[in-house]
Image: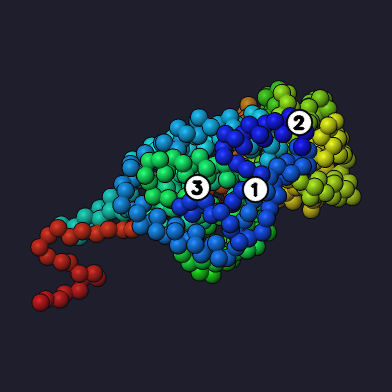
Amino acid sequence: MSMDLMKIRKEIFNELGLNSTNSGIYAAGWIKNPSGKKVVSISPIDGKSIATVLTGSKQDYEMVVKKAEKAQAEWLRLTPPQRGELIRLIGNELRKQKSDLGKIVSIETGKTTVEGEGEIQEMIDIADFAVGLSRQLHGLQMASERFEHRMYEQYLPLGVIGVITSFNFPSSVWSWNSFIAAVVGDVVVWKPSSKAILTAISVMRIVTKVIRENHYPEIFSLLTGSGSEIGNLMSSDPRIKLISFTGSVKSGRIVSETVARRFGRTILELGGNNGSIVTAKANLNLSLKGVAFGAMATAGQRCTTTRRIIVQDKIYKEFISRLKVIYSNVKVGNPRENGVLVGPLIDDQAVKNFDKAVEVARKEGGKVLVGGKHTTIRGLEGGYYVQPTVIEMPRVTPVTCEETFAPILYVFKYDTLDEAIRIHNAVPQGLSSSIYTTDLMEEEIFLSSLGSDCGLANVNTATAGAEIGGAFGGEKDTGGGRESGSDAWKSYARRQTVTINWGKDIPLAQGVKFDV
């Protein structure tokens, strides 16, 4: 590891209580010797080891779930506003630790400094949202057809839920689920990606410190391990009432089928193959900025990354010419350095996937306009860096229907808006979308049932960068789940319709007469 990274690691390890070898199991306390495999955390910045984590096995899993069930029984005795108070305290502590946590995110996942701290800011924001929500867990009151009766609905906790997260948003997605579920009254078992395992441990050290100091039930547990073992145990366990899974479509199908067999619930946030339409009536400066950010932020490793742009033929030449200049000048390198927009991919396999996609795109008629190759950063030769890439495609092809987690942008040309929408909707994924236009009719068509088929639709802004206040999720192969804001909290609760007879008679259903 480079001297700069070694110095940062030493500082934040001291601050966050990390060691060269760490336990990856927390269940009302850190388990010193979990019985699973050792996992080495590798920094994609230089390809070198950061620390080792001891992960869990089936034996550890049973212990974690039993302790979670115990915590659930205690947690139910607190009111929603009391639960919200814990989340408020956690949010305050995250504010204090934002810088150090952001550094861990950056070193372990390769995000830039700004994006690393932004990850923690999302946790703080959702904590604030959850605190307010804790006083607004409301149901409807409905008119009863029976005299002297009252009917309403209420939302009650599900119980123990499981959250399985990906490396690209290693802490914020956990908080989207966990803070909301907690104020509803659930407890959470977290299985993080093994590619972002130290981030999860660091977050749990902060969160559980607040819980212990304020004498709350141990509602959050951490269970590291492989998806094939720990993830499958969680998915098949009827004690886990809901599984929130973020990951690939392939893995999501397995989770969905496994949970469905036991009639459990899922929130699935799977692949995104997000497109932006740029019309002749777009503000070009604005659209170029939005497209470039959406395509290159986080080195193309966001589920909301802009992976396809569909540009009207009237402005195609000018738009692409200017986009090529932006790509040629963007700074790729150490994400800890100022001015760097594009850091490394997560690992060597991600680089291989990038290479394969570029090769296949060429075979399918694509023309590489910018990039398409690896790049080496001086002093960080072991890192996983590639050039941000723009590929002109003659039509929708199989490779453009796949999600490659890398900074590859496919470009299409169109004539009419109907044609653009057909190209846009021609992929199996349906997460985020955008249109750049100053024309009201074009905007409204895109936002209508004739337009975008995605869960997120944006006008004059990037496909990336969703706010926590709105429900996040997509359609088609993206899974159909919703988490974070709006009324997504209802996913973590069971709905109960209540009827109260406050009269002296009991009208029977279907007009049945029965006297006693």
Near-viewer residue (327 or 171): 171
| Mark 3 vs 1, N-terminal side | 1
Near-viewer residue (510 or 388): 388
| Mark 2 residue type | Met
- Taking the spot 31% from the left edge, 58% from the top edge, the residue there is 497
The span from disc 3 to disc 1 (Cα, nearest Å) is 28 Å
Q: In screen coordinates, is 52 left or right of 407?
A: left
Secondary element at tag 2: helix
Q: Relative to residue 496, is residue 455 depicted above or below?
A: above
Q: In screen coordinates, is 256 left or right of 376?
A: left
**Residue 445 locus on image (x, y percent):** 60, 39
| Mark 3 vs 2, N-terminal side | 2
- Which is in the foreground here, disc 3 or disc 1? 1
Q: Relative to residue 446, is residue 67 depicted above or below?
A: below
**Residue 399 locus on image (x, y percent):** 79, 50
- Taking the spot 76% from the left edge, 31% from the top edge, the residue there is 3
The span from disc 1 to disc 2 (Cα, nearest Å) is 20 Å
| Residue on which the image places disc 3 | 177
| Residue on which the image places disc 2 | 3
Near-viewer residue (154 or 450): 154
Rendered image: mark on residue 21: 1
Q: Is residue 471 visible?
A: no
